[in-house]
Image (cartoon, helix red, strand yellow):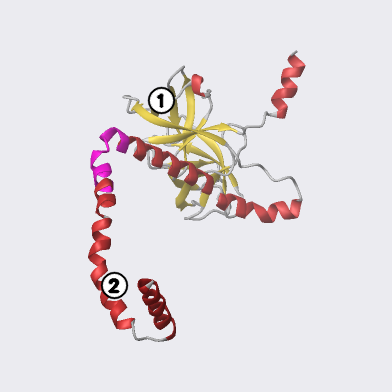
Amino acid sequence: MVLGLAATALILVNLYTDWLDPVRERLSSLAAPFYWITGTPSRVGDWAEDQLRTREELLEENSRLKHQVMLLEQQTQLLAAVRAENTQLKELMNSAESVDQRVLVAQVIGVSPDPLEHVLIIDKGRNDGIRDGTAIMDASGLLGQVIEAGLFSSRVLLITDANHALPVQVLRNSLRAVAEGTGDLYRLKLRHLANTSDIREGDLLLSSGLGGRFPAGYPVGEVIAVKRDPGKAFADVEVQPRGLMNRSRFVLAVIGSDEPDPAQSVNAEARD
């Protein structure tokens, strides 16, 4: 009873006066070491868990985080194209083109030994949904397309190969052109672009989607030089690819949307 009365008295004094503030401050300082001691088992457990993690677990976590970053960057790449198309879509009132694509993360496991061809080997094939013509990209832009899909691996022809060409358009004004490979990993060129065309250094080129091979709206390259000769009908336009042709270890295979293609369904019904 005496202790209860004393506790009640201390509570009332603490509520209605500041007499106990100096005492409470000193007691807080004295209690700090006890808090540190009681938290020691938790800190020891965290330290032991960090020290006992295996190298395989760290590698697995690192690989998973890289895949997540690539998927997020792939989704944000289309924002610039969507913004540029908003004005046109409002004026034309046409249905917006879907940019939701199903992608698959693959790893580059080899390159062609032939210096005259730009070909990568990836560790995904037909068993994973890869087909001939599947578009391949990295976190920066388009890399190329599958030219030979095996069961468990595939060969990818880069857009810089001298035998490759793809339709593109300028982000700034939607000017269409064809970007050809030059055999140089760091340079593309635009074919048959008139001298009077509105194109300038710094213009960003996106895939136009024409031909149906590459999805529309993905970065292809940036114009680095425009040379116009009055005696020639076409301008000489050089483009630097956005994709890291010789540095990407992980790539994305653009499988396509999850919805079935209506045209393919109609063709299948017609064949039946």
- Residue bearing mark 2: 28
Front residue of 209/68: it is 68
Please identify, in this view, whether the residue under mark 1 or under mark 2 is nearer the observer: 2
In screen coordinates, is 56 left or right of 229?
left
Q: Quadrant of residue 112?
A: top left
Front residue of 198/221: it is 221
Task: State the residue lying farthest toward the top.
Answer: 272
Q: Which amino acid, by three-letter code, is at mark 2?
A: Ser
The range drawn in magenta is: 46-58
Residue drawn at (56%, 51%), measured in percent from left and top? 79
- For the residue labelled by badge 2, is the local secondary structure a helix, a strand or a loop? helix
**Residue 162: in sight, yes or no?**
no
Image quarter hosting the N terminus: bottom left
Image quarter hosting the C terminus: top right
In screen coordinates, is 241 left or right of 57?
right
Q: Is residue 26 above or below residue 158?
A: below
Q: CA distance from mark 1 to mark 2?
A: 61 Å
Q: Position of residue 227 (x, y in %)?
A: 46, 51
- For the residue labelled by badge 1, is the local secondary structure a helix, a strand or a loop? loop
- Residue bearing mark 1: 123
